[in-house]
Image: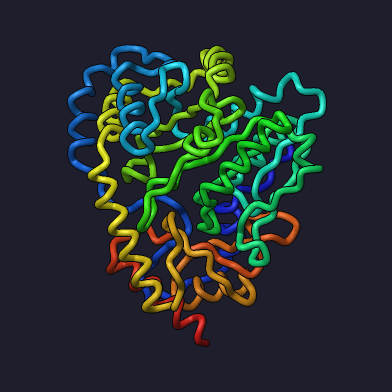
Protein backbone atom coordinates (compact mmCIF):
# COMPACT_ATOMS: atom_id res chain seq x y z
CA UNK A 1 0.00 0.00 0.00
CA UNK A 2 1.25 3.44 -0.90
CA UNK A 3 0.58 5.54 2.19
CA UNK A 4 1.52 9.21 2.23
CA UNK A 5 4.29 10.09 4.70
CA UNK A 6 2.75 11.32 7.95
CA UNK A 7 2.98 15.11 8.54
CA UNK A 8 5.28 14.84 11.54
CA UNK A 9 7.69 12.61 9.63
CA UNK A 10 7.67 15.17 6.80
CA UNK A 11 8.57 17.80 9.38
CA UNK A 12 11.44 15.68 10.67
CA UNK A 13 12.75 15.30 7.13
CA UNK A 14 12.43 19.03 6.47
CA UNK A 15 14.40 19.95 9.59
CA UNK A 16 16.82 17.01 9.56
CA UNK A 17 19.86 19.02 8.53
CA UNK A 18 18.87 22.27 10.24
CA UNK A 19 20.73 23.23 13.41
CA UNK A 20 18.49 25.10 15.87
CA UNK A 21 19.74 28.20 17.67
CA UNK A 22 21.16 26.96 21.02
CA UNK A 23 20.44 30.35 22.63
CA UNK A 24 16.80 29.28 22.87
CA UNK A 25 15.34 26.31 24.69
CA UNK A 26 13.52 23.84 22.46
CA UNK A 27 9.76 24.38 22.09
CA UNK A 28 7.23 22.72 19.82
CA UNK A 29 3.72 23.73 18.83
CA UNK A 30 3.31 20.87 16.36
CA UNK A 31 1.27 18.12 18.01
CA UNK A 32 -2.27 18.48 19.33
CA UNK A 33 -1.37 16.84 22.62
CA UNK A 34 -2.44 18.73 25.77
CA UNK A 35 0.52 19.35 28.02
CA UNK A 36 -1.51 19.89 31.19
CA UNK A 37 -1.50 17.29 33.96
CA UNK A 38 -4.31 14.76 33.88
CA UNK A 39 -6.75 15.54 36.75
CA UNK A 40 -6.10 13.66 40.00
CA UNK A 41 -9.54 12.05 40.16
CA UNK A 42 -8.89 10.33 36.82
CA UNK A 43 -5.51 9.07 38.00
CA UNK A 44 -7.08 7.83 41.24
CA UNK A 45 -9.71 5.88 39.30
CA UNK A 46 -6.92 4.34 37.22
CA UNK A 47 -4.98 3.30 40.31
CA UNK A 48 -8.06 1.89 42.03
CA UNK A 49 -8.80 -0.32 39.03
CA UNK A 50 -5.21 -1.45 38.41
CA UNK A 51 -5.84 -4.88 39.93
CA UNK A 52 -8.21 -5.62 37.04
CA UNK A 53 -5.28 -6.11 34.67
CA UNK A 54 -5.71 -9.85 35.22
CA UNK A 55 -8.99 -9.83 33.29
CA UNK A 56 -9.81 -9.55 29.60
CA UNK A 57 -11.86 -6.47 28.69
CA UNK A 58 -15.10 -6.72 26.75
CA UNK A 59 -15.02 -5.43 23.19
CA UNK A 60 -18.38 -3.76 23.84
CA UNK A 61 -16.99 -1.89 26.85
CA UNK A 62 -17.77 -2.27 30.54
CA UNK A 63 -21.10 -1.06 31.92
CA UNK A 64 -19.37 1.69 33.91
CA UNK A 65 -17.69 3.09 30.80
CA UNK A 66 -20.88 3.04 28.77
CA UNK A 67 -22.77 4.72 31.60
CA UNK A 68 -20.09 7.42 31.79
CA UNK A 69 -20.37 8.07 28.06
CA UNK A 70 -24.18 8.12 28.16
CA UNK A 71 -24.04 10.52 31.10
CA UNK A 72 -21.69 12.77 29.14
CA UNK A 73 -24.00 12.88 26.14
CA UNK A 74 -27.00 13.64 28.33
CA UNK A 75 -25.28 16.38 30.36
CA UNK A 76 -23.40 17.95 27.48
CA UNK A 77 -25.86 17.66 24.57
CA UNK A 78 -29.15 16.64 26.26
CA UNK A 79 -29.06 13.46 24.18
CA UNK A 80 -30.77 10.41 25.70
CA UNK A 81 -28.84 7.77 23.81
CA UNK A 82 -29.45 4.05 24.27
CA UNK A 83 -26.78 1.38 24.55
CA UNK A 84 -27.32 0.28 20.96
CA UNK A 85 -26.58 3.83 19.76
CA UNK A 86 -23.04 4.05 21.14
CA UNK A 87 -19.87 1.94 21.03
CA UNK A 88 -16.76 2.67 23.14
CA UNK A 89 -13.60 2.74 21.05
CA UNK A 90 -9.84 2.74 21.65
CA UNK A 91 -9.56 6.47 21.08
CA UNK A 92 -10.84 7.74 17.74
CA UNK A 93 -7.88 7.21 15.46
CA UNK A 94 -8.57 3.48 15.23
CA UNK A 95 -12.27 3.94 14.50
CA UNK A 96 -11.54 6.58 11.85
CA UNK A 97 -9.24 4.07 10.19
CA UNK A 98 -11.28 0.89 10.44
CA UNK A 99 -14.88 2.14 10.25
CA UNK A 100 -14.54 3.16 6.56
CA UNK A 101 -13.08 -0.29 5.82
CA UNK A 102 -16.07 -1.93 7.49
CA UNK A 103 -18.63 0.34 5.84
CA UNK A 104 -17.20 0.29 2.32
CA UNK A 105 -16.00 -3.31 2.09
CA UNK A 106 -18.91 -4.53 -0.02
CA UNK A 107 -19.28 -1.36 -2.09
CA UNK A 108 -18.01 -1.94 -5.63
CA UNK A 109 -16.62 1.55 -6.32
CA UNK A 110 -16.65 3.33 -2.96
CA UNK A 111 -16.48 7.11 -2.67
CA UNK A 112 -15.31 8.99 0.42
CA UNK A 113 -15.69 12.74 0.93
CA UNK A 114 -13.80 14.70 3.56
CA UNK A 115 -12.31 18.16 4.24
CA UNK A 116 -9.00 19.30 2.78
CA UNK A 117 -6.69 20.00 4.67
CA UNK A 118 -7.42 17.13 7.01
CA UNK A 119 -6.40 14.72 9.74
CA UNK A 120 -4.36 12.28 7.68
CA UNK A 121 -6.02 9.15 9.04
CA UNK A 122 -9.00 9.96 6.76
CA UNK A 123 -6.75 9.55 3.75
CA UNK A 124 -5.23 6.34 5.05
CA UNK A 125 -8.68 4.86 5.55
CA UNK A 126 -9.65 5.83 2.01
CA UNK A 127 -6.58 4.12 0.56
CA UNK A 128 -7.21 0.88 2.42
CA UNK A 129 -10.88 1.00 1.45
CA UNK A 130 -9.96 1.47 -2.25
CA UNK A 131 -12.15 4.56 -2.20
CA UNK A 132 -12.22 7.44 -4.61
CA UNK A 133 -11.72 10.65 -2.64
CA UNK A 134 -13.62 13.87 -3.17
CA UNK A 135 -12.25 16.83 -1.23
CA UNK A 136 -14.22 19.50 0.56
CA UNK A 137 -11.61 22.22 0.16
CA UNK A 138 -11.32 24.60 3.13
CA UNK A 139 -9.79 27.96 2.35
CA UNK A 140 -10.08 31.66 2.97
CA UNK A 141 -12.47 32.11 0.03
CA UNK A 142 -15.12 29.89 1.64
CA UNK A 143 -14.25 30.90 5.23
CA UNK A 144 -12.89 27.37 5.78
CA UNK A 145 -16.38 25.86 5.54
CA UNK A 146 -17.10 22.69 3.51
CA UNK A 147 -18.79 23.70 0.26
CA UNK A 148 -21.65 21.50 -0.87
CA UNK A 149 -21.48 20.01 -4.35
CA UNK A 150 -24.64 17.95 -4.66
CA UNK A 151 -23.54 16.34 -7.91
CA UNK A 152 -20.50 14.92 -6.12
CA UNK A 153 -22.49 14.00 -3.02
CA UNK A 154 -24.94 12.01 -5.13
CA UNK A 155 -22.28 9.32 -5.58
CA UNK A 156 -20.82 9.52 -2.05
CA UNK A 157 -20.93 6.52 0.28
CA UNK A 158 -19.24 8.10 3.32
CA UNK A 159 -18.82 11.78 4.13
CA UNK A 160 -16.58 12.78 7.03
CA UNK A 161 -16.98 16.23 8.50
CA UNK A 162 -14.68 17.64 11.14
CA UNK A 163 -16.24 20.42 13.14
CA UNK A 164 -14.67 22.00 15.12
CA UNK A 165 -11.99 21.61 12.52
CA UNK A 166 -8.38 20.48 12.70
CA UNK A 167 -6.32 22.29 11.44
CA UNK A 168 -8.26 25.45 10.53
CA UNK A 169 -10.30 25.85 13.78
CA UNK A 170 -13.43 26.61 11.76
CA UNK A 171 -16.80 25.68 13.29
CA UNK A 172 -19.97 24.74 11.42
CA UNK A 173 -23.23 26.37 12.53
CA UNK A 174 -26.26 24.39 13.64
CA UNK A 175 -28.00 25.34 10.40
CA UNK A 176 -25.09 23.99 8.37
CA UNK A 177 -25.04 20.76 10.36
CA UNK A 178 -28.78 20.36 9.83
CA UNK A 179 -28.32 20.87 6.09
CA UNK A 180 -25.70 18.12 5.98
CA UNK A 181 -28.03 15.72 7.78
CA UNK A 182 -30.71 16.48 5.20
CA UNK A 183 -28.21 15.84 2.41
CA UNK A 184 -27.23 12.49 3.97
CA UNK A 185 -30.86 11.43 3.95
CA UNK A 186 -31.53 12.81 0.47
CA UNK A 187 -28.52 11.14 -1.17
CA UNK A 188 -28.37 8.14 1.18
CA UNK A 189 -24.76 8.43 2.28
CA UNK A 190 -23.37 7.88 5.78
CA UNK A 191 -22.42 11.16 7.45
CA UNK A 192 -19.85 11.09 10.24
CA UNK A 193 -18.66 14.12 12.19
CA UNK A 194 -15.30 13.98 13.95
CA UNK A 195 -16.15 15.95 17.11
CA UNK A 196 -12.93 15.53 19.09
CA UNK A 197 -12.72 19.29 19.73
CA UNK A 198 -16.39 19.97 20.43
CA UNK A 199 -15.77 20.51 24.16
CA UNK A 200 -12.96 22.99 23.56
CA UNK A 201 -15.28 25.89 22.82
CA UNK A 202 -14.19 29.27 24.15
CA UNK A 203 -17.57 30.85 24.90
CA UNK A 204 -20.88 29.33 23.81
CA UNK A 205 -21.23 25.54 23.98
CA UNK A 206 -21.32 23.89 20.57
CA UNK A 207 -23.91 21.34 19.39
CA UNK A 208 -23.26 17.82 18.21
CA UNK A 209 -24.23 16.61 14.76
CA UNK A 210 -26.65 14.34 16.63
CA UNK A 211 -28.41 17.46 17.94
CA UNK A 212 -28.74 18.64 14.35
CA UNK A 213 -30.17 15.25 13.38
CA UNK A 214 -32.81 15.57 16.09
CA UNK A 215 -33.62 19.11 14.94
CA UNK A 216 -34.55 17.95 11.44
CA UNK A 217 -36.69 15.11 12.77
CA UNK A 218 -34.17 12.32 12.21
CA UNK A 219 -34.48 11.07 15.78
CA UNK A 220 -33.23 7.57 14.95
CA UNK A 221 -30.03 9.12 13.55
CA UNK A 222 -30.44 7.26 10.26
CA UNK A 223 -27.18 7.59 8.27
CA UNK A 224 -25.72 9.88 10.97
CA UNK A 225 -22.79 9.16 13.29
CA UNK A 226 -20.35 11.08 15.46
CA UNK A 227 -17.08 10.20 17.09
CA UNK A 228 -15.56 11.83 20.15
CA UNK A 229 -12.49 11.41 22.32
CA UNK A 230 -11.39 12.04 25.87
CA UNK A 231 -7.88 13.02 24.80
CA UNK A 232 -8.40 16.75 24.28
CA UNK A 233 -11.25 17.46 26.71
CA UNK A 234 -9.64 15.72 29.70
CA UNK A 235 -5.95 16.16 28.90
CA UNK A 236 -5.71 12.38 28.92
CA UNK A 237 -4.66 11.13 25.47
CA UNK A 238 -2.99 8.11 27.07
CA UNK A 239 -6.35 6.73 28.16
CA UNK A 240 -7.21 6.06 24.49
CA UNK A 241 -10.91 6.44 25.16
CA UNK A 242 -13.39 7.42 22.49
CA UNK A 243 -16.79 6.46 21.14
CA UNK A 244 -18.83 6.28 17.99
CA UNK A 245 -22.54 7.07 18.36
CA UNK A 246 -25.65 7.45 16.23
CA UNK A 247 -27.39 5.09 13.80
CA UNK A 248 -28.06 1.87 15.73
CA UNK A 249 -28.53 -0.20 12.56
CA UNK A 250 -25.03 0.64 11.34
CA UNK A 251 -23.51 0.22 14.79
CA UNK A 252 -25.05 -3.22 15.27
CA UNK A 253 -23.06 -4.65 12.38
CA UNK A 254 -20.00 -2.58 13.19
CA UNK A 255 -19.99 -4.07 16.70
CA UNK A 256 -19.76 -7.56 15.18
CA UNK A 257 -16.84 -6.38 13.04
CA UNK A 258 -15.07 -4.93 16.09
CA UNK A 259 -15.04 -8.28 17.89
CA UNK A 260 -12.48 -9.35 15.27
CA UNK A 261 -10.36 -6.19 15.45
CA UNK A 262 -9.06 -6.79 18.98
CA UNK A 263 -8.93 -3.18 20.16
CA UNK A 264 -10.75 -3.39 23.48
CA UNK A 265 -9.42 -0.97 26.09
CA UNK A 266 -7.75 -2.46 29.22
CA UNK A 267 -10.10 -2.45 32.22
CA UNK A 268 -8.16 0.06 34.35
CA UNK A 269 -8.25 2.51 31.45
CA UNK A 270 -11.98 1.96 31.02
CA UNK A 271 -12.73 2.75 34.66
CA UNK A 272 -10.56 5.87 34.60
CA UNK A 273 -12.22 6.98 31.36
CA UNK A 274 -15.67 6.35 32.83
CA UNK A 275 -14.91 8.83 35.61
CA UNK A 276 -13.59 11.39 33.13
CA UNK A 277 -16.53 11.14 30.72
CA UNK A 278 -19.06 11.63 33.51
CA UNK A 279 -17.47 14.85 34.77
CA UNK A 280 -17.59 18.22 33.02
CA UNK A 281 -16.09 20.51 35.67
CA UNK A 282 -12.49 19.56 34.94
CA UNK A 283 -13.06 20.31 31.24
CA UNK A 284 -14.14 23.83 32.10
CA UNK A 285 -10.75 24.32 33.78
CA UNK A 286 -8.89 23.31 30.63
CA UNK A 287 -11.12 25.45 28.43
CA UNK A 288 -10.19 28.46 30.57
CA UNK A 289 -6.51 27.72 29.94
CA UNK A 290 -7.01 27.56 26.18
CA UNK A 291 -9.06 30.73 26.20
CA UNK A 292 -6.24 32.52 28.03
CA UNK A 293 -3.72 31.23 25.48
CA UNK A 294 -5.78 32.71 22.65
CA UNK A 295 -5.90 36.02 24.51
CA UNK A 296 -2.11 35.93 24.68
CA UNK A 297 -1.99 35.14 20.96
CA UNK A 298 -4.16 38.14 20.15
CA UNK A 299 -1.92 40.34 22.29
CA UNK A 300 1.28 39.15 20.62
CA UNK A 301 0.26 38.16 17.08
CA UNK A 302 -2.99 40.08 16.66
CA UNK A 303 -4.88 36.88 15.79
CA UNK A 304 -8.57 36.56 16.56
CA UNK A 305 -9.59 33.62 18.71
CA UNK A 306 -11.62 30.89 17.00
CA UNK A 307 -14.87 29.53 18.42
CA UNK A 308 -13.17 26.28 19.45
CA UNK A 309 -10.06 24.04 19.43
CA UNK A 310 -6.58 25.01 20.59
CA UNK A 311 -5.19 25.70 17.10
CA UNK A 312 -4.17 28.84 15.28
CA UNK A 313 -4.14 28.55 11.49
CA UNK A 314 -1.55 31.25 10.91
CA UNK A 315 -1.18 32.81 7.48
CA UNK A 316 2.42 33.27 6.33
CA UNK A 317 4.08 34.02 3.01
CA UNK A 318 5.88 30.70 2.58
CA UNK A 319 5.07 28.02 5.17
CA UNK A 320 8.11 25.86 4.39
CA UNK A 321 10.60 28.73 4.56
CA UNK A 322 8.93 30.12 7.69
CA UNK A 323 8.98 26.76 9.47
CA UNK A 324 12.64 26.24 8.65
CA UNK A 325 13.65 29.74 9.71
CA UNK A 326 11.67 29.58 12.93
CA UNK A 327 13.42 26.36 13.92
CA UNK A 328 16.87 27.48 12.84
CA UNK A 329 16.80 30.91 14.47
CA UNK A 330 14.39 30.42 17.38
CA UNK A 331 14.44 26.66 18.14
CA UNK A 332 10.67 26.44 17.75
CA UNK A 333 8.79 23.86 15.71
CA UNK A 334 5.46 24.46 13.97
CA UNK A 335 3.65 22.40 11.33
CA UNK A 336 3.45 23.60 7.71
CA UNK A 337 -0.12 23.65 6.47
CA UNK A 338 0.82 22.08 3.16
CA UNK A 339 1.76 18.90 5.06
CA UNK A 340 -1.90 18.62 6.07
CA UNK A 341 -3.52 19.28 2.69
CA UNK A 342 -3.58 18.14 -0.90
CA UNK A 343 -3.89 19.92 -4.26
CA UNK A 344 -2.42 23.13 -2.87
CA UNK A 345 -4.73 23.52 0.13
CA UNK A 346 -2.87 24.48 3.30
CA UNK A 347 -0.14 26.33 1.45
CA UNK A 348 0.68 29.67 3.03
CA UNK A 349 -0.31 28.56 6.53
CA UNK A 350 1.27 26.99 9.59
CA UNK A 351 -0.62 25.26 12.38
CA UNK A 352 0.14 26.29 15.95
CA UNK A 353 -1.06 24.03 18.78
CA UNK A 354 -1.45 26.15 21.92
CA UNK A 355 -1.31 23.22 24.32
CA UNK A 356 1.02 24.57 27.02
CA UNK A 357 0.59 26.67 30.13
CA UNK A 358 0.51 30.41 29.57
CA UNK A 359 4.20 31.04 30.28
CA UNK A 360 5.48 28.64 27.63
CA UNK A 361 2.78 29.70 25.20
CA UNK A 362 3.75 33.33 25.58
CA UNK A 363 7.43 32.53 25.02
CA UNK A 364 6.66 30.52 21.88
CA UNK A 365 4.39 33.21 20.42
CA UNK A 366 6.95 35.93 21.09
CA UNK A 367 9.50 33.96 19.07
CA UNK A 368 6.99 33.67 16.23
CA UNK A 369 6.32 37.39 16.36
CA UNK A 370 10.04 38.15 16.09
CA UNK A 371 10.37 35.79 13.13
CA UNK A 372 7.42 37.41 11.39
CA UNK A 373 8.88 40.88 11.86
CA UNK A 374 12.16 39.99 10.18
> Can residue 175 be seen here?
yes
Look at the picture and state if 166 lies above or below 90: below
Residue 15, how many percent across, how many down?
Answer: 56, 64
Query: Residue at the spot x=29%, y=59% of the render?
Result: 289
Q: Quadrant of the N terminus?
A: top right
Number of disc labels: 0
Q: In the figure, is residue 144 to the left or right of 227? A: right
Residue 203, how many percent across, how many down?
Answer: 35, 57
Residue 86, how many percent across, how many down?
Answer: 45, 23
Q: Nearer the viewer, residue 126 or 7?
A: 126
Snapshot quadrant of residue 130? top right
Snapshot quadrant of residue 254? top right
Look at the picture and state if 372 lies above or below 98: below
In this picture the colour scheme is rainbow
Look at the picture and state if 189 lies above or below 84: below
Query: Residue at the spot x=66%, y=44% of the render?
Result: 114
Query: Residue at the spot x=59%, y=20% of the render?
Result: 250
Look at the picture and state if 141 lies above or below 247: below
Q: In the figure, is residue 50 to the left or right of 313? A: left
> Can residue 23 be seen here?
no
Query: Residue at the spot x=28%, y=35% of the render?
Result: 276
Q: In the figure, is residue 283 to the left or right of 254? A: left
Residue 331, how many percent across, how many down?
Answer: 44, 71
Amino acid sequence: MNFETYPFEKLNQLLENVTPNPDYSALSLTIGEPQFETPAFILDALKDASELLNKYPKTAGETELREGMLTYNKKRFDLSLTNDQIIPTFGTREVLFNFPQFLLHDVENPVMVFPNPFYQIYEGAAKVSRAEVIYLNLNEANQFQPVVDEEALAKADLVILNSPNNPTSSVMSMDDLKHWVELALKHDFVLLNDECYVDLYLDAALPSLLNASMEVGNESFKNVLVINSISKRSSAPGLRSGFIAGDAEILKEYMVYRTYVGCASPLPLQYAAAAAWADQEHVDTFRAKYKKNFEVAKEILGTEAPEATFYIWLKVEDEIAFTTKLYQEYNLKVLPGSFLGREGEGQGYVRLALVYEEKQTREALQRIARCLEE
